[in-house]
Image (cartoon, rainbow, N blue to C red):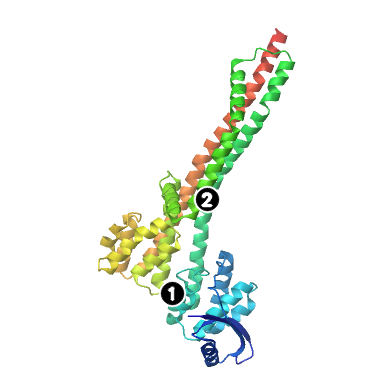
Amino acid sequence: MPTFEFDSLTSDGRKTAGTIEADSHCQAQQQLAGMCLCVNSLTECRKPRTFKKVGRDEFLLFNQQLASIAKAGIPLERGLRELAGDVDSPRMRKRINEIATELESGAPIEKAFGAHSSGFPELYGQILKAGVQSGQLAEMLTSLNRHVEMGRRAKRMIVEAVTYPAFILVLAAVIMSFCIANMDSVEAMYADMGMEHLPAFTRLVLSLGRHVADAWIGVGLFAGACVALAVCLNVTGAGRRFKERLLLNMPVLGRLLQRSLLSRLADGMRLLVGAGCDLPTCIRLSAAATGSGILQNECEPFARALEEGEDIASAGRQCRMIPPLFVYSAHIGAQRNELECHLANLSCMYEQQAQGNLARLHSLLMPIMLIIVAAIMTLCIVALLMPLMSLINSVQG
């Protein structure tokens, strides 16, 4: 169905813009007239429109403002119109107006936001729908902000866990490069001083430096191949799954990543259970929201088993990535009508475990990396100073 872009005025004189789907230009005008809009311009979109993803900070600000509007008792459609007028980003303003237009034309909330899935989380429309139906929209939006912040903290933990060792390794490489680059000048200096017979350890280090220097081209090619491999792993779905599986199987770091994913999965399920979604939908949407392809694939048999009538305890055995404690706690919570509370406790527990794993990783890597760097520096300094010490001893003797 063709899509038309429009600029118009509302009945109270406010400017509004957006898109609308219709079979023809005439039908689009009739639909807009039925929405009490005075159309200034109406043009057909010749190509499918794509949307850049809303940034996390931009989304959090939008969500916080929408929660404030909801607390004031303003209807969602009117609130979106008011919010669009205060948004600085033209791209975001246009998107909000388009969603408001679809809602005013009678589209379901989840469908209106689902049409802009590249801009908002997949579970956003479901949460808004539940919030409007239950009269707790502000509370649901505030809870969603906490969920997004949890995802930000989890991502920061993973970045910290990977960045610190990488920084130390780069530092060690820089130190080695500096030492190797000066090996020839040091050897020439000793030759000028008439020291032809250098200590065996010094000759070994100088020889090693010459061989490493000759191999820099190979090192550069290897580094380029590693960068190309990293890009390929991030571009394809199979590559991303391979990279994720590799990280999950690494000691300490893998446990950190798993605990972080479980924390986000539990919190997403808590949010959707509170929104009134059925459990299979909660599992699918929450797994997708973590961004983990492996977890998403693992959770699909879990969700299907629940749809076939199995209880949580037996269905949870289908997912190897979810620990028995997670499944058992959710099972008990569902039996006692306290599933939301149990999921909140699980989310908190796994987040604390992830933070503990991060601290353990730092406590293990910091001394190891520092020892490696210190050893490299010490060996280079000792190798370079040994001839001078020999010369001083011979002069004193």
Report whether residue 193 is seen.
yes
Q: In the visual, does 284 lie left or right of 42?
A: left
Q: In the visual, does 96 lie left or right of 181?
A: left
Q: Name the residue beneath numbered marker 2.
A: 231
Whichever of callouts 1 and 2 sits on the residue coming sooner in the sequence is 1
- Assign a secondary structure to mark 2: helix
Q: Relative to 268, does residue 259 appear above or below in the rendering?
A: above
Question: Label 1: how many residues lie within 10 Å, few (<14), some (14-19) or many (20+)?
Answer: many
Residue 152: x and y, percent? 52, 60
**Foreground: 235 or 314?**
235
Question: Label 2: how many residues lie within 10 Å, few (<14), some (14-19) or many (20+)?
Answer: few
In the figure, residue 282 lies in which quadrant?
Answer: bottom left
Q: Amino acid at mark 1?
A: Gln
Q: CA distance from mark 1 to mark 2?
A: 34 Å
Residue 314: x and y, percent? 25, 61
Report whether residue 341 is seen.
no
Residue 137 tag number: none
Taking the spot 45% from the left edge, 47% from the top edge, the residue there is 253
Q: Name the residue beneath numbered marker 1.
A: 126
Q: Amino acid at mark 2?
A: Val
